[in-house]
Image (cartoon, rainbow, N blue to C red):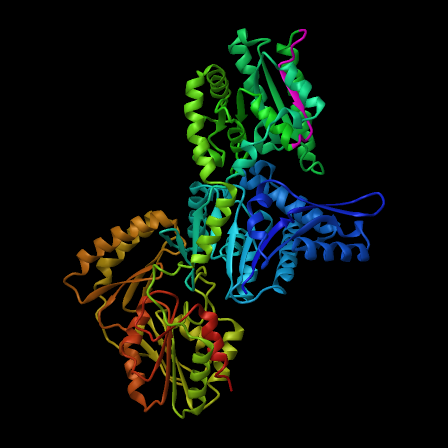
Amino acid sequence: MPKTIIISNRLPVSITIADDKKILISESIGGLATGLKSVHAEENSLWIGWSAIESSEVSPEKREEIDRTLLKKYRCLSVHLDQNEIDNFYYGYCNKTIWPLFHYFPNMTTWEHKHWEVYGEVNRKFYNAVAGQLSDGDTIWVHDYQLMLLPEMIRAKHPNVKIGFFLHIPFPSYEIFRLLPRREAILNGILGADLIGFHTYDYVRHFFSSARRLLGYENAFGKINLGNRLSKVDAFPMGIDYERYNKAGRVGEIKEGTHKLLEETSGKQVVLSVDRLDYTKGIPERIRAFSHFLELNPYYAEKVHLIIIAAPSRTALNSYNDLKREVEELVSEVNGKHGKIGWMPVWFFYQTFTFSELAALYRGSDVMLVTPLRDGMNLVVKEYIACRKDYRGIVVLSETAGASSELSETLSVNPNDSNAIAAAIKEGLEMPVNQQIHRNKIMHERLKRYTVKYWAEDFLQKLDDNDFGSLYSEAIWIKAKDSKSIVEKYQASKKRLLIFDYDGTLTPLCQLPGQAKPTAELLQLLRNVTKDPKTTLLICSGRTKEDMDNWFGALPIDLSAEHGIWIRRSGQEWEQHMVLNDEWKKQIRPVIESYVDRTPKSFIEEKTLGMAWHYRRCEPDQANVRLNDLRDTLMEYIQNENLCLLDGSKVLEVRDVNASKGNIVNLWLQKDEWDFIVCAGDDVTDEEMFSVMPERAFSIKVGTDSSAATYHVKDCNAIIDLLSSFEV
């Protein structure tokens, strides 16, 4: 039976070792653990994560005991991290590079190669943990920024599993993300997933933009075309356990200290702030805005309190300890400036409160101040709303929190604008009860419908639907039995013709100019295949004859360059197959050059009897505008000429209508009585080859696009594998 495997940095349990060395394990409450509880409760489920215990803290025997208990009782598989990995992976790359950068704090971001190396090693450690558990048909759901390389690692070795990935923090805009070293590796890692989830559509849009600009991957209808498959990207705003919060907050469940706090605020209005102590939360800005509110509204003196609860977070990092000092100094400053005997305006608690205590405070406050500078979602605002069974209380919510896109009935503010926050606090404190109830009832219904359980089920259902290829034609993929049949027929044949395109067929497409040179391994493979005198191999490319000669001239193979204008049979000189007029270039060249001048990173490739405008490295939106404009302009120039326009992969080419790969391939087809033919290509121009293939030929399209070819393969690696089976 297929399994569902959840993978996150931490396990959904808390593990402590008592003074008597006894192991204490308890289930975590809230957030991801609550959302995936129903999924993890199924018999065929497994949760993989770090136990939060440093390897040397316990003996190997005790660690084995913990592992057995976790697996048997909690269906959890623990990944062990040593202190070096914790320092460089968690406190290093995750919290000094990814966390600040993805939250738009490049000034607090550090780049250390050691951190990156260990990040990759820990992701590999998680892969090794899951690899031993996988079977075809399993579903894997990878969570968050600590494991962004993991989906691709799984995909590379296990193509027949479904992989989901969810990022719980913001995905930044391209202009921020491009600052990240190894950014392509991060994108490719995430794109190993079939379904990629974010909290808001803004993050989806940013991801699309970076994938296009940095990797050249286009998207349509929420799907990214990776050439060999599709990856769906969508927004899934995470919810909360609505019923749990809606029923919480009874005074009898809270401690004496919280009782006293509620008693002391009785008769006064309360503005509440609840967060982890983190520089992304905007706590100092919040305190300054409250001070500004008191300056603008002095009549609120002795009538209102700001209660700030900041749970300790990442205390091993200096930046967090610096933030704590800054907050404490600000609180002291505001209290000294505005306080009176018997009234302290700001109360600061650097501690954690229990669930029941927080719920009671939610119910006892008039305004909830949630103004992070940047937040992936922020569930505190949803918790506050759900706790208010009386539908009262107003939320002042930052427009840069993910929750803002869902909760438009809150008072939305720019978290950097103290005037706006001060005005919103005043509006919230003075809003008529009927207006409060009207706003909150709408949000209650929304939170009641889209709970954290619904969020998890919705994501897994979308992943299970597996409709990601629906934009494309039904492709007939080469399977193991097909490959075996092709190889058997190859071995039994006496006259073989192998015809291959180069870019995208024998080598990956997404490469910068100058990086498409064939590898030594590919050259050796081609040499080995052609050792058999029964085999003739033709590489038919749109590249110049100079490139083809430099790369393949020393091999005993046939070559065709510039879509058949130049040909070279093995051991012979190049000859121009077609003598065509190129006078038209004088008129066309200035037109294309004007577009190169106005489109950074585009360039002209001039061939013997053709001209091509390349735009693979260009800014995608600008390139698309220029492409349509240039296409229309060139059509006017060539309408009375014997020329045609050809849209290739990130290239627009003008060429003579008689220059065709199909014409050249026909020459080779007629040369002999071939009893075995394979023809493979990936681009629009290769359809010309497929169209002239006899029925007995094996024509193979690389990629998912519709084609006249008989078969499809996912990428050029499949073509290399097929060629390898032909080696002598």
In this rendering, the count of numbered labels is 0
Looking at the image, residue 584 sits to the left or right of residue 30; the answer is: left
* Image position, residue 172 (x, y; %): 49, 42
Quarter of the figure with residue 562: bottom left
**Main SS class of the magenta portion in the image:** loop
> Residue 277: in sight, yes or no?
no
Single out the residue that lies furthest toward the left.
640
* Image position, residue 580 (x, y; %): 22, 72
* Image position, residue 170 (x, y; %): 51, 41
Magenta range: 341-354
> Residue 355: in sight, yes or no?
yes
User: In the rendered structure, does residue 368 fall within the stretch colored magenta?
Assistant: no
Single out the residue that lies furthest toward the right.
20
User: In the rendered structure, does residue 345 fall within the stretch colored magenta?
Assistant: yes
Please tell me which residue is depicted at 45% across the width and 53% down the height of the picture: 461
What quarter of the picture does the N terminus occupy? bottom right
Up-down relation of residue 461 to residue 702 (above or below) = above
Quarter of the figure with residue 5: bottom right
* Image position, residue 120 (x, y; %): 62, 55
Up-down relation of residue 12 to residue 427 (above or below) = below
Looking at the image, residue 92 sits to the left or right of residue 555; the answer is: right
In the image, 12 versus 489, the foreground residue is: 12
Up-down relation of residue 418 to residue 531 (above or below) = above
Up-down relation of residue 562 to residue 621 (above or below) = below
In the image, 671 versus 654, the foreground residue is: 671
Please tell me which residue is depicted at 41% across the width and 68% down the height of the picture: 503
In the image, 15 versus 341, the foreground residue is: 15
